[in-house]
Amino acid sequence: MTEHTSPSADATPLIVALTQDLFFGVRLEDAIRRAGARPRLVSNGEELAAALAARPALAFIEMGRGDAAWHGVVRGLKSTSAGHSTLVVAFGSHLDTAARQAARQAGSDHVWAKSHLTEELPALLARVVARAQARGSGTGEGTGYEDPPSAEAVRGFQEFNHGEYFEQHETLEGAWMAEKRPVRELYQGILQVGLSCYQVELGNWRGAVKMLRRGLPRLERLPDLCQGVRVRSLRETGEAMLAELLRLGPERLGEFDRRRFPKVTWQRGSEPEA
């Protein structure tokens, strides 16, 4: 089946949905097809694990339906570098606080009420499909991946490396807002990693972990070398930082060695001309 081919073998992104609600599953399947993606519906954790092995662009997971095996599946997915390329959206009742907390702890990128997912579904699918197609095209025309970073972005990179994490957020947010091509993910991913460092300095373990879990998937969707930035190196040091934070936990955050904060490195000659 085509779902088990490598991501580069089919330009049409795969989107997985774990749900036992047949009616809602049909709605998801139809919306996914209309967005230009391939749907794959599963009903339990074992089927989910098989589907995630195909590295889908997006996975929808319904919470609180009696099968909690997916928690371990998602946790295992997010513990790998490749797994960050799959956006995981858990959904269910906004009143089920225990299920929502479990979904966050498992590593879900978003935990939404079912009503919110219904509202956001068309826009979410459009974004995911566009990003998957841009990633599949490598450094193709129109992505901005091969262009030099903007002067504002370079200033943000420098602030990041100088430990000016609040300032880099302000600067890179401006660069992100000004850039409309897929490469804008580079700026937002870096600023969110920087915000994680800022949260460590503030003693906010939960905030630090949350920002890394938001920023690293953005970097995963980019080429290893993007606008001259060594994305792979940044991503790997960010993943190592996340693993160490999870190992220490909130009680031992003070033991985190800040020399392990990531750095943004880029090739000489990739800066914009003065």
Image (cartoon, grey):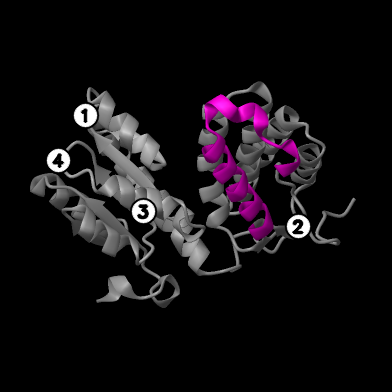
Q: CA distance from mark 1 to mark 4?
A: 13 Å
Q: Which residues are magenta?
A: 232-260
Query: Element at badge 1?
Result: loop
Question: Does the CB distance between marks 4 and 2 fall below 8 Å?
Answer: no
Residue 12 shown left or right of residue 70 in the figure: right
Res 66 label: 4
Q: Is residue 39 magenta?
A: no
Tell me the crowding category of disc 2: few under 14, some 14 to 19, or many 20 or more residues within 10 angstroms, Cα based.
Answer: some
Main SS, magenta residues: helix
Dot 3 or dot 1, earlier in sequence? 3
What is the quadrant of residue 111 in the picture? top left
Asked if residue 31 can be seen in this view, the reply is no
User: Does 130 appear above or below 102?
Assistant: below
User: Does 149 appear above or below 206?
Assistant: below
Res 148 label: 2
Residue 164 is situated, as x and y percent measured from the top left of the image, at 78, 31
What is the quadrant of residue 52 in the picture? bottom left
Q: CA distance from mark 3 to mark 1?
A: 20 Å
* Amino acid residing under circle 4: Gly
Dot 4 or dot 2, earlier in sequence? 4
Residue 55 is situated, as x and y percent measured from the top left of the image, at 39, 63
Dot 3 or dot 4, earlier in sequence? 3
From the image, which quarter does the N terminus lie in? bottom left
Where does label 1 land, which residue?
Answer: 93
Residue 192 shown left or right of residue 134 in the figure: right
Residue 62 is situated, as x and y percent measured from the top left of the image, at 22, 42
* Amino acid residing under circle 2: Pro
Where does label 3 land, which residue?
Answer: 58
Q: CA distance from mark 3 to mark 4?
A: 22 Å
Query: Element at badge 4?
Result: loop
